[in-house]
Every structure is written in structure tokens, then in C-alpha cells.
Amino acid sequence: MYIRQKKSWELSENKVTPESVYLTRRKLIQQTGLAGFGLIMGSAPISAVPIGGFPPVRNTEYTLDRTLTSEQDATTYTNFYEFGSSKNIWRKAKKLNTDPWIVTIDGLVDYPIQIDAGELTKKLGGMEERLYRHRCVEAWSMAVPWAGFPLSNLVKFASPKIGAKYIRMETFFQPEIAPGQKQSWYPWPYVEGLTINEARNELAFLAVGLYGKPLPNQNGAPLRLVVPWKYGFKSIKSITRFTFTDERPRSFWELLSPKEYGFWANVNPWVPHPRWPQDRERMLGGGTIPTQLFNGYEKEVSYLYKNEYTNNKRELFY
Ligand code: MTE
């Protein structure tokens, strides 16, 4: 396993976390006791359980090379096309009712299930907080504390069959409360996908919280994906379905414009995009910095792509 040395310029944890929520990785694993989580079989929906565990415990393995974005910026400048194409949709998103929230896990799995998001997250171990960078293909970026669970815990919970190679994820479809979904030229519902190996990578995360609190609707309540080495559009919000499949999913943006939004969508400063620069990024709150390959997570994820590409890093975008 790669052991990361802290760089001199990195923000120290005690600048952003109260001491009371520190825990070492070891303690965290002891607390989560993942090995013991049980499986629920069958397909009957289960009654709603609130998502608990706040404030989350900071996992100090995940550090930043920049200052944290303010909560105000990260929660009022958002992309959620279901509520419109402007960044200022946070008021409109309040209409989404996220409790109860039934999540379906199906496809090539041993235990297809429909389960309330609160109940599901109780099955996924102890909640942890991670500081991650986020880079949108539109060339803006932020750095925020997500709370949630490794996606690999959900993969274990679902117990995929041998033939399952991908996970297809889907957002709700409720045009009566989400005005963007009345725009019929978009291929609703929003869909994204990962390979199973990407989903098992330690960085792939299912977030239920932000800044130590439950996720606000505009950031993808109650459950969203966070894959920080990929462009932000891969991090699908308000997930209602995880389907394990042997077919590569075709995502919302890929269906709309395959030349602009590929399946892999790994952050890559060397692959130009027709609309936005990819070699530099504008941080919410101020400042422009160079964009890094895999958004700076190359050591953690590059092994995933050895068989997918030649050695030419310029091909990694699509
Ligand atoms: N998920 C859904 N369902 N709908 C969306 O429009 N936008 C994506 C992604 N997930 C989007 C989505 C894009 S383009 C980005 S950059 C991120 O969410 C933005 O996440 P944030 O608004 O929490 O910063």
C-alpha cells in the first residue's frame, strides 16, 4: 500500500478539525467493524431510518494541498441540472424530499434489495470524514470535507456476481418538483457509471454529509458519489439505484455529447476540452492554479488504467 508523506505546504488537520473528532485510521477501522456487517435479503422496502453519526470522525489519511473552500461557496455554487442549468439552484432543490429515500441495488448481485438510504448507510460501517479536491470539467474547483463511506463497502454489501464488471448509478426522476427534468431534450434520469475496480478503489466514496452535517439537497442529498480523480460530472447526486452489470453504462453527459464527456473522464490537464481550459482551474473563493493529472491522485489510481490505455497519458480523458 502507498504510504503518503505529508508535504510541508499541506494544511495541518488541527487547522480544520476540532481535536475531539480526531481518530487514527486504526481506531476508525476498529470502530466501523466492517467485517461484521450483515446482509438483508429480499426486495421489500424497509421503513426510513435517519442518517446518523454526525459529526463524523475525520480520517486523517486524506489531506489537502490548498485551503478548504468556504461552506457558503460550496453549497451555493452547485451543478444540479435537475433543478436548472444555473449554479444558483439551492433554493429550488429544497423541494426534494429525501426522507424516506428508497435505494435499489440490483442487476448481477447475490442480494438484490430495496432499502431506505438511512438503513443502508447503517449497514456500510462507521461514517468518516475526508478532505478531497473536486475539479469540474468547467474549470472550477473546490476542496471540501465530505462525510460518508468507502464505495467498496457498498460493493461488499451487494455481493456482485463474477460477471459484474460495472456499476451503473441513477438519480431520481421527479419532473413535478425538479423543473430541469421537464426539459425533454436531456436524457433523464441522470446516469453515471464506474468499473467495479474503480468502485473498489480506496478513494471512491459515498457521501451523506458535507462540513460535518447531512448533505444539503443541492449537493446531492441523501446519498451521492464522490470520485475525486475524475471530473465532477462523474460524482452523481441523489442516487436511487445501483445496478451491477456486464455492460459499460452510458452516462447522461456521454449520451448528450460523447466527444466532450467520455466514460473515463479522468482529470487530465493535457487533454483539451472544446469549451473549457483543462490545464488550469479557478478555485471557488479565489485564485487560479495548475490542474494536476488525476486531480493530484495519480499514485492512488493510476494502476486502474494500465490495461485500458497505452502509456500515453494524453489518452486518459476518454
Ligand atoms: N448529479 C446529478 N444528478 N445532476 C447533476 O447535474 N452535476 C455534476 C455532479 N453530479 C450533477 C450531478 C457536476 S457537472 C458536478 S461538477 C458536480 O455534481 C457538482 O457537485 P457540487 O454541486 O456538489 O459541487
Image (cartoon, grey):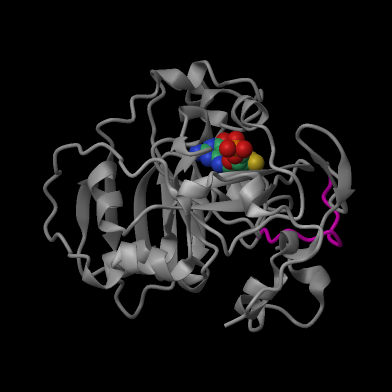
Residue 38 lies in quadrant = bottom left
Q: Nearer the viewer, residue 34 or 314?
A: 34
Residue 265 lies in quadrant = bottom right
- Please, is residue 50 above or below residue 242 in the view? above
Residue 75 can be seen in this image: yes
| Residue visible at 55% across and 64% down in the picture | 203
- Residue 3 x %, y %: 63, 78
User: In this figure, what is the number of numbered marks?
Assistant: 0
Lateral position of residue 139 relative to residue 129, left or right: right
Residue 187 can be seen in this image: no
- Residue 165 x %, y %: 43, 73
Q: Nearer the viewer, residue 74 or 192?
A: 74
- Residue 146 x %, y %: 52, 46
- Please, is residue 229 above or below residue 171 in the view? below
Q: Nearer the viewer, residue 1 or 252?
A: 1
- Residue 180 x %, y %: 53, 24
Query: Which of the image's four quarters has the N terminus?
Result: bottom right
Ligand 1 rendered quadrant: top right
Query: Which of the image's four quarters has the C terminus?
Result: bottom right
| Residue 14 among those drawn in magenta | no
Q: How would you classify the magenta stretch by its main secondary structure?
A: loop
| Residue visible at 47% across and 67% down in the picture | 25
| Residue visible at 33% across and 68% down in the picture | 30
| Residue visible at 66% across and 27% down in the picture | 77
Q: Which residues are magenta?
A: 265-274
- Please, is residue 65 above or below residue 299 in the view? above
